[in-house]
């Protein structure tokens, strides 16, 4: 089991005692305290074991609230003895240790960086972290959010809770003064959604997003996202042609998220952004291939885009000629692809049986007579010469192209095919900027 760790910054104010509680807590059962840390630990960290830790960061000025001592009461104009947070935590009889760690005041950029390093160095791989962000210098909440993301990446921490004790929001409930504990963990989750969705939209890799969606039990979204990502990264042209996963994903993403949860309301906008990428997919169409190619180019997947473009030009022609039943027939696809560039009188059919030879001769005849053959032939030739051969041989050529050159080339080839689709089928495929 991973280690649990509670982190908090102790402030310097002379805190008044109040009952910190959740909306579901019965006021009469809440133990009043001067310290939000005590209330959060009592409520959310009662299951901490010997290997877990409670860590409170203190400046020199905040030590007065860590240790027992005299405090000036302005209302009574006198000194009063108060137990420090250290004593209060000891009385909780925690199984884990509770200690303070000295940090700088955080009043300069250099001191903020020092605090960042001190807190980061405390984390161990896969820690489960509970943050209290109630007190401390005004820059610390922002520091915590940045630190969380940083540690998630480098130390694989998992944020289990983010809390704020809203003393200023206290109310009288059943005759008892109660200040709410706000649980802000959903903001960390939303940050994960944002990062993972961005990764998917920029790279085509949905693994992190799929893993997070699993927490919310959106099975249809999760499964279809994972499948689409695999189709793209693995060049599964027939699955892209089929379109069912993309249509299913679009339908699943169209469903409304539970409106009572603020985090889900914000999440809906992210899901809408993802859904817009799948608006144009249809059932069993070569157009799906060109949409996927555009996606690949947007995401820098030049190799996938090149392979898919060559294959979907062949698929497009098979559709045009009414031969979709041969979409997965390798020999037919080779014949159709070759016939785009080789004239019928020079076509080499190789050894074939009579009935097979008759089919391929008819295919070559139909491709040769196809009115847009010449334009497609020019496009296929450019694609092979400028990209396909270079990519398939890993750049082991006399003049291998750079990634930028290949990226510009595939964008140009896609735009040429998009123009042909508009001309042939009057379907508008948006152009890509070169």
Image: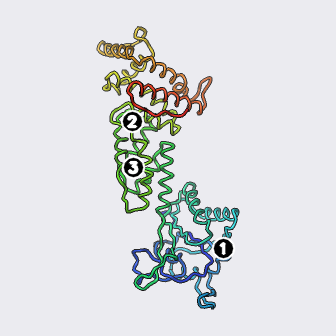
Which residue is label 1 attached to? 59
Q: Secondary structure at mark 1?
A: loop
Q: Position of residue 387 (x, y in %)?
A: 53, 26
Vertical arrangement, residue 103 with respect to residue 404, above or below? below
Q: Secondary structure at mark 2?
A: helix
Rendering colour mode: rainbow
Mark positioned earlier in the residue sequence (2 or 3): 3
Q: Marks 2 and 1, how far apart in space?
A: 59 Å
Which residue is label 3 attached to? 222
Q: Position of residue 337 (x, y in %)?
A: 42, 20
Q: Nearer the viewer, residue 63 or 379?
A: 379
Name, please, the residue furthest toward the top: 345
Q: Position of residue 389 (x, y in %)?
A: 53, 24
Vertical arrangement, residue 382 with respect to residue 349, above or below? below
**Disc sitting over residue 240 in the figure:** 2
Count neighbours of disc 1 (C-alpha within 10 A) and say few if under 14, some if 14 to 19, many if 20 or more.
Answer: some
Count neighbours of disc 3 (C-alpha within 10 A) and say few if under 14, some if 14 to 19, many if 20 or more.
Answer: many
Q: Secondary structure at mark 3?
A: helix
The residue at the point 67 percent across, 62 percent down is 113
């Amino acid at each position: 089991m991973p280690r649990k760790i509670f982190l908090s910054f102790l402030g310097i104010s002379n805190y008044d005692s109040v009952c910190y509680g959740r909306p579901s807590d019965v006021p009469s059962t809440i133990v009043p305290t001067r310290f939000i840390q005590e209330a959060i630990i009592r409520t959310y960290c009662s299951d901490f074991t010997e290997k877990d830790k409670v860590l409170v960061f203190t400046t020199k000025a905040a030590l007065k609230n860590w240790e027992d001592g005299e405090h000036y009461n302005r209302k009574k104009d006198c000194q009063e003895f108060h137990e420090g947070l250290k004593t209060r935590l000891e009385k909780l009889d925690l199984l884990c240790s509770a200690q303070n760690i000295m940090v700088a005041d955080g009043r300069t950029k250099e001191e903020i960086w020092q605090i960042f390093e001190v807190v980061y160095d405390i984390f161990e791989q896969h820690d489960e972290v509970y943050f209290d962000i109630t007190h401390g210098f005004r820059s610390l909440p922002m520091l915590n959010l940045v630190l969380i993301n940083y540690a998630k990446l480098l130390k694989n921490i998992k944020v289990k809770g983010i809390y704020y004790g809203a003393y200023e929001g206290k109310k009288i409930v059943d005759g008892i003064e109660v200040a709410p504990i706000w649980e802000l963990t959903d903001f960390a989750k939303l940050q994960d959604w944002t990062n993972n969705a961005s990764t998917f939209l920029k790279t085509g890799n949905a693994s992190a997003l799929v893993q997070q969606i699993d927490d919310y039990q959106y099975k249809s979204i999760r499964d279809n996202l994972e499948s689409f990502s695999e189709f793209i990264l693995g060049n599964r042209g027939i699955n892209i042609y089929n379109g069912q996963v993309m249509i299913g994903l679009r339908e699943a993403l169209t469903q409304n998220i539970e409106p009572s949860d603020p985090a889900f309301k914000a999440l809906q906008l992210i899901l809408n952004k993802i859904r817009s990428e799948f608006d144009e997919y249809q059932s069993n169409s070569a157009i799906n291939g060109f949409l996927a190619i555009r996606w690949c180019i947007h995401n820098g997947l030049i190799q996938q885009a090149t392979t898919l473009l060559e294959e979907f030009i062949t698929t497009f022609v098979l559709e045009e000629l009414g031969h979709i039943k041969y979409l997965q027939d390798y020999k037919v696809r080779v014949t159709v692809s070759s016939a785009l560039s080789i004239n019928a009188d020079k076509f080499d059919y190789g050894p074939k049986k009579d009935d097979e030879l008759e089919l391929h001769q008819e295919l070559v005849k139909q491709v040769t007579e196809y009115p847009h053959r010449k334009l497609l032939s020019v496009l296929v030739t450019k694609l092979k010469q400028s990209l396909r051969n270079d990519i398939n041989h890993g750049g082991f050529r006399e003049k291998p192209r750079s990634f930028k050159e290949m990226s510009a080339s595939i964008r140009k080839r896609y735009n040429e095919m998009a123009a042909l689709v508009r001309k042939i089928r009057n379907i508008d495929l948006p152009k890509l900027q070169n």
